[in-house]
Amino acid sequence: MFTSLNSIKDLEKKTYEIRESVIRMLANANAWHAGSNLSIVDILTVLYFSFMRHDPKNPEWKDRDRFILSKGHGCATLYAVLAQIGYFPKEELMNYRKSCGMLEGHPNMATTPGVEMSTGCLGQGLSAGVGMALAGELDKKTFRIFVLIGDGESQEGQIWEAAMAAAHYKLDNLVCILDYNKCQSGWRIEDAMRIEPLTLKWHSFGWYVIEIDGHNIQEILDAFGNASDVKGKPTVIVAHTIKGKGVSFMEDVVEWHARPVTQEDGERALEELAYKKSKL
Amino acid sequence: MKMRDAYGKALVEIAKENKDVVVLEADMYRGCGVKLFYEEFPERFFTMGIAEQNMVGVAAGLAASGKIPFVNTFACFFLRAIDQIRVAVAYPALNVKIVGGHGGISTGPDGATHQPVEDIAVMRAIPNMTVIVPADPTEAAQATRECVKHPGPVYMRFTRPDIESIFDENYRFKVGKAPLLRQGSDVTIMATGIMVSFALIASDLLAREGLGVRVLSCSTIKPIDKKMIIQAAEETRAIVTAEDHNILGGLGSAVAEVIGEGCPVALERVGVRDCFGQSGKTKELQRIYRLTAQDIAKAVRKVVKKKRKC
């Protein structure tokens, strides 16, 4: 097993290490999706380093909690977390998006230890989460399923098919986290296709709804704790986040969804993150 | 007997021995033959509502957790979940069995929307996917058993109308094997699904004209039985394919690919000629779209002439 981080301060420190790792990966691969990756760092750090039951040395452990990154384009963060916690060597991160490596541009469960579902075409992860939750109930297992979806992704009809199914089957072992960073690939959400009133939608679909600041470690921890106590219905955590969080020139700028991170961008971002980390 | 009923019965038998087998359906459980499963194993039966994309995704999640999900709806409706089949099922090679009922024009009065002529082509083009089209109820039941033993994604396509028995109880279906139904050295008919029974009738008609017609049942379209096809091409030098599906992308294309690379010989394809169907009785539609035993026989006469010229 790994040593879980129990203090807010340790978790906060870890979020900086993950952000640094993500920036290095993106700059190394000249990859895009910086904004979408940085908005989910805090949530994934809390999940993997503090909340989920899992064993990096035994990724196939039957009783493990499962995490599905439905917004697959945020996988640099998932890979950074999986490497830091011991699913595979950190050196692999420099092969992200490179041919013959194990880290695809979007998650592939067949090549990457710790990746629970292949995703990347949006709208699909929550359905797989419903399937895993049903399997857990069928086998009378106590493992829990966490699925992270995007806000732009919520425009996909399949998300709402899955939302309906999860409530129908009363899947209280399923938690959906909505990364509400208010931006999608080329637009602000409200300009592309309005998804509000979002919490009302989830309420009306039969889910227990928690709304939090997705960058506040304590609120994230509390939300996962509360979700565990909900019985008879699935929980959605609507996490208000900032696209590009942590790197000031990327924050809340739509363009950083699809703009490749250059070496120069990377150095600038790392400088800022190092400074912020030293101030913790 | 209907293929779907043989399938449903087999699935119940399998599920008695294998507790990992589960069934999902999108409000088509009667039409897909899985009502019996629901009655026997309600706890392993999941209604998914009329939401095919989610159903396929849920099946992927179940398979990732060690279950063997059989996903059921009409073949035409799986076409709206191709992205889910591609990414969530085929890409990670998950053990999901996709069972499409009511394949082809023979579906009848519901019309073109419910008569998929593209499904085999689409499924065949997806990496990691196995494609099985049984020819009769016995084979449907056996294919169901075999695909449980065969790890990874499988697409199985059934036909709606009653089909006469072709195979007896001693027959053993094997994934990737095309059973030889008739021996003959003048020409080979390679048929799939409902067309296999018509191929047999055609071979009887042609025998009276002195033609020795070999008949292969291409029950597995992918992986196609290259060995049997090449052997037939080498020995008979003329091939007719027959399918209740578009001639583009289905069995006809698969066979053309194999002989084109391995042993180019004369070929005629019987199938839907790249058009949509329409409402009507099954027999009527088979006549209109030239999918009858007579149409196969006509194609055989044509290919034999072609063979002489080649």
Image (cartoon, rainbow, N blue to C red):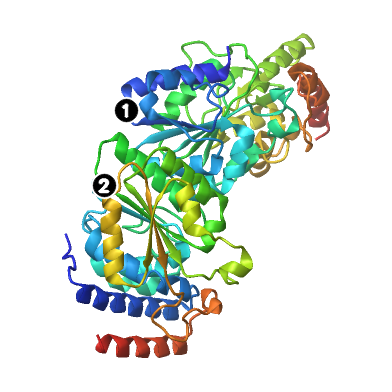
In the depicted view, which residue is nearer to us: A279 or B288?
A279
Q: Determine the residue positioned at 41% across, 39% down.
A: B95
The residue to which callout 2 is attached is: A143
What is the tally of numbered marks visible in this picture?
Answer: 2
Front of the two marks 1 and 2: 2
**What amino acid type should be assigned to the residue bearing mark 1?**
Lys
The quadrant of the rendering that contains the N terminus of chain B is: top right
Position of residue B66 relative to residue A96, above or below, is: above
Position of residue B200 relative to residue A211, above or below, is: above
**What amino acid type should be assigned to the residue bearing mark 2?**
Phe
Element carrying mark 1: loop
Q: Residue B281 at what x, y percent from top left?
A: 76, 18
Element carrying mark 2: loop
Within-10-Å neighbours for mark 2: few <14, some 14–19, many 20+: some
Instruction: Name which quarter of the figure residue A27 lies in.
Output: bottom left
Q: Which mark is residue B19?
A: 1
Q: Residue A276 at what x, y percent from top left?
A: 31, 87
Q: Residue furthest top?
A: B208
Position of residue A14 relative to residue A142, above or below, is: below
Q: Is residue B227 left or right of residue B151?
A: right
